[in-house]
Image (cartoon, rainbow, N blue to C red):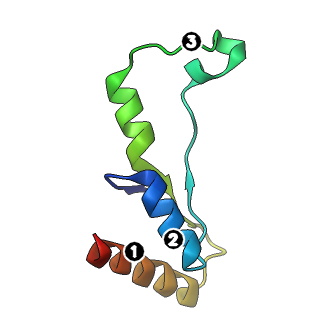
Amino acid sequence: LVKTSNAKDFIRFMKAGGVSASQIHYLNSYYSGFGANTMDLPGANQIMDQIVGIPCGWWVSTEDLNAIISRIEAYCNHC
């Protein structure tokens, strides 16, 4: 997981460089099964807007890991 000030921009930047990235999940309050209301949850909304999932796990090779790190560094230099 990566914390960033702008998850959507980070995701676009990573994908443009060939690195998968995605928002972890939406709050349950967004789904109709949970009433689909827009509750005022400022802390939860802030986390949802700042946390991004990047590839991790045994299947990520050293080469992949280096590419992911390079792209994150490029994003930090971009900001």
Identify the amino acid type marked 3: Asn
Q: Are marks 3 and 1 in contact (CB under 8 Å)?
A: no
Residue carrying label 2: 14
Q: CA distance from mark 2 to mark 3?
A: 31 Å
Earlier residue among tags 2 and 3: 2
Residue at 57% from the left image edge and 67% from the top image edge: 55
Q: Residue 9 at x, y = what percent?
A: 44, 59
Q: Residue 18 at x, y = what percent?
A: 60, 79
Q: Are marks 2 and 1 in contact (CB under 8 Å)?
A: yes
Question: Which numbered disc covers residue 37?
Answer: 3
User: At numbered mark 2, what does the secondary structure look like: helix, strand or loop?
Assistant: helix
Q: CA distance from mark 3 to mark 1?
A: 34 Å
Q: CA distance from mark 2 to mark 1?
A: 7 Å
Q: Residue 11 at x, y = what percent?
A: 51, 61
Residue at 56% from the left image edge and 75% from the top image edge: 16
Q: Nearer the viewer, residue 42 or 66?
A: 42
Q: Quadrant of residue 4?
A: bottom left
Earlier residue among tags 2 and 1: 2
Identify the amino acid type marked 1: Ile
Within 10 Å of disc 1 (Cα), the crowding (few <14, some 14-19, many 20+) is: some
Within 10 Å of disc 2 (Cα), the crowding (few <14, some 14-19, many 20+) is: many
Residue carrying label 1: 72
Residue at 27% from the left image edge and 78% from the top image edge: 77
Q: Residue 39 at x, y = what percent?
A: 46, 13
User: At numbered mark 3, what does the secondary structure look like: helix, strand or loop?
Assistant: loop
Q: Nearer the viewer, mark 3 or mark 1?
A: 3
